[in-house]
Amino acid sequence: MAIETWDSPYIVIWLCLGVLATVLTLGVRGYSGKLNGLEAAFYGVVIGGLAILDGAVLGQTMYDKTEKVWGNLGTMLGLSGSLIVSGLILIVFYRNRVVKHPDEVTVKGEDLEINKSYLLGGITSFMTYGLLAAGIGAMNIVMDIVEDKEGIIYGLAGLVPLVIAIWLIAKYSKWMFKYIVWVLRRKGLLQVVDDKDSK
């Protein structure tokens, strides 16, 4: 672990609070429609940087107090957890955004048409990188546990978490939009365009 002096759990707490404050600011700006591309990129970089530091510090703290495998677990939880939670928080803001502006999500025939949104872009980025980091981190943990054992089965076992993470990345956007459509339909706000009427 590189950050040998940052082994205090209080630093982890402050980094988590920094991620939370930044993502809430991003969410509020995105919900109100005041977010531009430069701001979105800035907030994304800040959240990503804080998440990396959070993973490094939490991993160092757990490694100092236990052993390597727990240090890797702390790194995975600090990094991927910060990004995934940020994505989930932004989903709440995006849901409220489309309830306020239901025309941003339209069902046209069998297609779902969605207006471009920096808020939606943030959700996609954070969830993708968070799930990928979780998969890679879990793979490292599995390999640490079975490092003294031999055989291709143990080697392939290390790839399972990464495969699961990639599968979740491919599926989560579909689940998210099903949820958004369900919310709009339940509130009677879903915009449905008939192809015949639009011609």
Image (cartoon, helix red, strand yellow):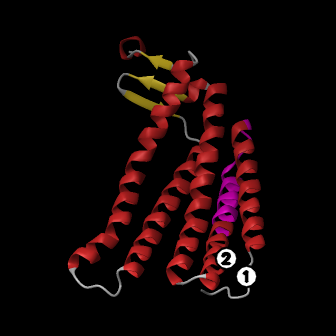
Which SS class for mark 2? helix
Residue type marked 2: Val
Residue depicted at x 33% and y 88%: 148
> Would you say residue 118 is visible in this rendering?
no
Residue 44 screen position, x and y as percent: 65, 59
Q: Residues within 10 Å of mark 1 (few under 14, many from 20)?
A: some
Residue type marked 1: Trp
Residue depicted at x 64% and y 82%: 65
Residue depicted at x 67% and y 73%: 53
Q: Is residue 6 above or below residue 9?
A: below
Question: Magenta segment, which residues?
Answer: 32-49
Task: Assign the C terminus to one quadrant of the image.
Answer: top left
Contact, CB < 8 Å: mark 1 with mark 2?
A: yes
Q: Is residue 27 left or right of residue 115?
A: right
Which SS class for mark 1? loop
Residue 197 screen position, x and y as percent: 41, 11
Q: Is residue 137 left or right of residue 119?
A: left
Q: Residue furthest top?
A: 197
Pick whichever, 82 or 69, lies toward us.
Answer: 69
Q: Gap in Å between the C-alphas at discs 1 and 2?
A: 6 Å
Residue 111 screen position, x and y as percent: 38, 29
Pick whichever, 58 or 179, lies toward us.
Answer: 58
Residue at image mark 1 = 6
Q: Is residue 34 magenta?
A: yes
